[in-house]
Image (spheres, helix red, strand yellow):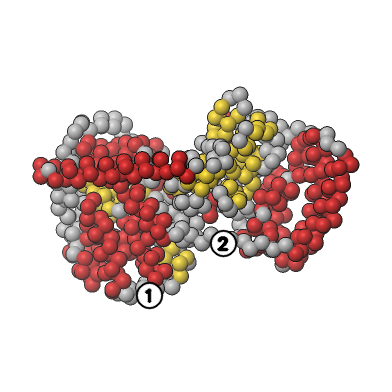
Amino acid sequence: VYNLTMVPCLLLLWIFALSTILNFCRADDSSNIYTYVPLENGANSLFIGHSFFIPVAVIFDRLVQQTQDSFPDHGFQTVARSGEGGSPSRLWEDQGSRAEVEGILMEGNIDILGMTVFNLDQSETDYHQRWINLALSYNPNTVVFIGSPWPIGGSYTATESISGTVTMLSQIIQTNIERLRSQNPGIPILLIQYGKASPVMKQKFEEGTLPDITRLVGSSRDSLYNDNFLGHAGMMMTEMCALTWLSILYGVPQEESITQYASSDWDVESVRNITTQLLEFNEKFMTREVVPTFSPSAQPTTTMMPSSGVTIAEGFDESVHCFSGNSKVKVKGNGDVPLEAIKIGDLVLVAPNRYERIYSFGHRKQASATPKQEITYLRFLPSGIEISPNHLIQVWGEGYLRAAYVKVGDSLLDGTHAPQVVTFIQSVTRDSAFAPFTRSGRIMVNGVQASTYAMISEVSDNQFPPFVASNYHLLAFLFQAPHRLYCQLWECSDETYTEEGLSLWVAQSSKVASLLSKQPYKLQYLVLSLVIPALVTLFILEKLVTFSCSVSALFFVGGILATLFPGFLGAFQIKNKQRN
């Protein structure tokens, strides 16, 4: 298995090496050199993107405003959306967002159009091209700026993994930018890989050489990241990125940016060291543009009037714990089917060569349903599974973990139960949610093993005893016994859902679990010691109904479990592995 998994890795490295060699050879041809001339008087800029991009733009504007006389041509506008809503594709496809951006562009005075990166495939480059075409149709002298942020999950991902991911992504993104440069001869298309700030600053923090940062995560000024899930940048990281923009876009010398623009309370040597590394990392992306090899795409033909105001959507909805409708399961007799198309009674693959019937949905919300929700999922590559942060997924060697705890380099289990290495993690926004329940509590989604259960979103691991947090999948399976038994005796095809798409069973169970989590550990142990024997009994009844097994044997086993489990639960402590 190890040798087989090395083949795609070596192939990927070979492609990167070949791309680098070809780019280097083209750079040596003096006829292909294009050098960007910084806009030293400033520029009227429009930045469109998400929360890993717009905050840097806002600080960039604030730095410039400190010495407005130095940049008389400076102007600043933004169109911001959260998550995938700020990607080039979603901004273009959403009529309101596109109208808002076009309403600003049609004034004909935007000198810099700034966009960000969300996906790495060809389709995103195509949407970058659409925005370029639109901007050039109103101002042929527009400078295009594409900024590449840091990967999500910086607070709980190993620093070397973040650094490796940034380096790998820089190769892929550079290739995409070179394609855009080929399509748009003579148009300055800048790439700033400011995401390098995350591994640089985290390494300095771990080494104790970043005196201004005393906490990894928090809302205060001395925190590296603002949150523990996505890993939004704290104030200092955001400002270091903005200083990099200032040097590249407006040509401000590094030392001048440190002494005249950086916040005076930051440690000067830290600022100098960080910005030096960022500028050196970006140097190779800023000095050349490739001679065209084919014609640009056609100009857009649709013009829409702008909408008023800028709406910044809220963060991800933590009440949702499921899969997006885009994810797929294998249905017996029908092959791969999107989750939005499956129904109760379908036989789905739950393990290698094993199918089980879907007896219920914990969450079922079609994309067209109201109220419309913007739900943020994690997409793990290469499988492409889209899963909510609190949903449980099986990680090789570690059992079932919250999806939010999975990091690049971890291995999921594929359709043969072989490890599949996670190479990249994306944040995507959808408006559908599905959580099908199977009798084993397992399901194969996009070819990887996942649980049908999720942690209660508003409850942290340490609010439950260690045994509960470490064995949530098993306990959730037991707590589903009454539900499974009911659906075995009476069909659940007409089950009722809340307005948000939650089944009434899950909605009520979540409230009970949330209430229990707020109680002292001793009381939680007492309640579980009383409830679990009853659940085991119901589980035995379920097996009797389902498989018609030996009644005496089953009750004998059930009696032993019901007798021993309370003492076992009180004594057994499993240290919960924290993924920070």
Q: Residue at x 36, y 36 (%)?
A: 123
Is residue 208 in view from this perspective? yes
**Residue 429 rendering spot, x and y as whole percentages:** 47, 44
Residue 23 vs residue 85, the one in the foreground: 23
Helix, strand or loop under label 2? loop
335 relative position to 217: left or right:
right
Residue to which mark 1 is pinned: 211
Q: Is residue 535 above or below residue 305?
A: below
**Residue pushed farthest left?**
31
What percent of the width, then of the height, locates residue 537? 83, 47
Quarter where residue 283 is shown: bottom left
**Residue 171 or residue 66, whichever sits in front:** 171
- Could you tell me which secondary element the residue under label 1 belongs to? loop
Q: Which mark is on residue 236?
A: none
Give the label on residue 578, or none. Answer: 2
Amino acid carrying label 2: it is Gln
Q: Give the residue drawn at x 42%, y 66%.
A: 224
